Image (tube, rainbow, N blue to C red):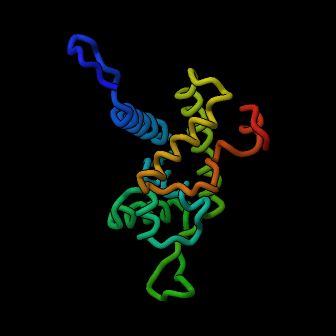
């Protein structure tokens, strides 16, 4: 709630804070993915494919928040690196489905370890027992604005030992 006194500073709006977080994360991810020879759009596409094998270029672009034209370049680079392979859809002759390769899964795991470290740094001041709840609330905000995220699918870090470490049942 904004103060009526113009001399008192008002707290930043949530949308502003989320925007700042988005920019800071993008900068950090760009810098930390570079040593892996990966760009943020490439990492995002591979992360999307982990749980959604066989997406078309258009589907992958939508879920990765890039244009279809950009995704064509992203998938070409991933294919050249041996991280994905594409094959013709059995139901739509002109559609190519994209799948992670074993090499891609290995590369994604290496990048995920770096992202885990970044997220640990980002959440250093958030008590461990509040982290899963924070993720749930942020996911609900994304869904409320029709930005995707399946309510039934937990984030990668909310599974197994991570939930247990946060004091939540697995």
Q: What percent of the width, then of the height, locates residue 88?
A: 52, 82
Q: Which residue lies furthest to the top in this view?
A: 7
- Give the camera-side residue of 168 and 97: 168
> Image point 56% across, 72% down: which residue?
54
Quadrant of the rendering where the C terminus is positioned: top right
Asked where in the image residue 71 lies, by quadrant, the reply is bottom left
Q: What percent of the width, then of the height, locates residue 156?
A: 64, 47
- Give the camera-side residue of 23 and 106: 23
- Give the camera-side residue of 163 and 151: 151
> Image point 56% across, 20% down: which residue?
125
Against 70, is 24 above or below?
above
> Image point 56% across, 61% down: which residue?
49
Q: Which residue lies furthest to the left in this view?
A: 6
Q: Is residue 104 left or right of residue 170?
A: left
Against 21, is 99 above or below?
below
- Give the camera-side residue of 140 and 103: 140
Number of numbered discs present? 0
Q: What percent of the width, then of the height, locates residue 135?
A: 57, 40
Quadrant of the rendering where the N terminus is positioned: top left
Q: Residue furthest front?
A: 4
> Image point 50% across, 51% down: which residue?
43
Q: What percent of the width, then of the height, locates residue 7?
A: 22, 11
Asked where in the image residue 112 lies, by quadrant, the reply is top right
């Amino acid at each position: 709630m904004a103060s009526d006194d113009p001399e008192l500073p008002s707290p930043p709006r949530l949308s502003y804070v989320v925007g700042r977080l988005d920019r800071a994360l993008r900068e950090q991810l760009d810098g930390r993915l570079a040593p892996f020879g990966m760009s943020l759009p490439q990492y995002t596409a591979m992360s999307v494919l982990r749980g959604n094998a066989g997406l078309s270029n258009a589907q992958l672009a939508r879920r990765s928040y890039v244009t279809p034209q950009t995704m064509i370049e992203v998938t070409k680079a991933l294919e050249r690196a041996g991280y994905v392979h594409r094959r013709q859809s059995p139901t739509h002759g002109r559609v190519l489905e994209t799948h992670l390769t074993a090499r891609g899964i290995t590369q994604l795991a290496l990048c995920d370890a770096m992202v885990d470290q970044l997220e640990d740094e980002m959440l250093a001041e958030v008590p461990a027992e509040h982290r899963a709840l924070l993720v749930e609330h942020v996911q609900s905000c994304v869904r409320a604005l029709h930005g995707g995220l399946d309510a039934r699918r937990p984030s990668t870090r909310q599974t197994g030992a991570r939930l247990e470490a946060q004091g939540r049942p697995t």
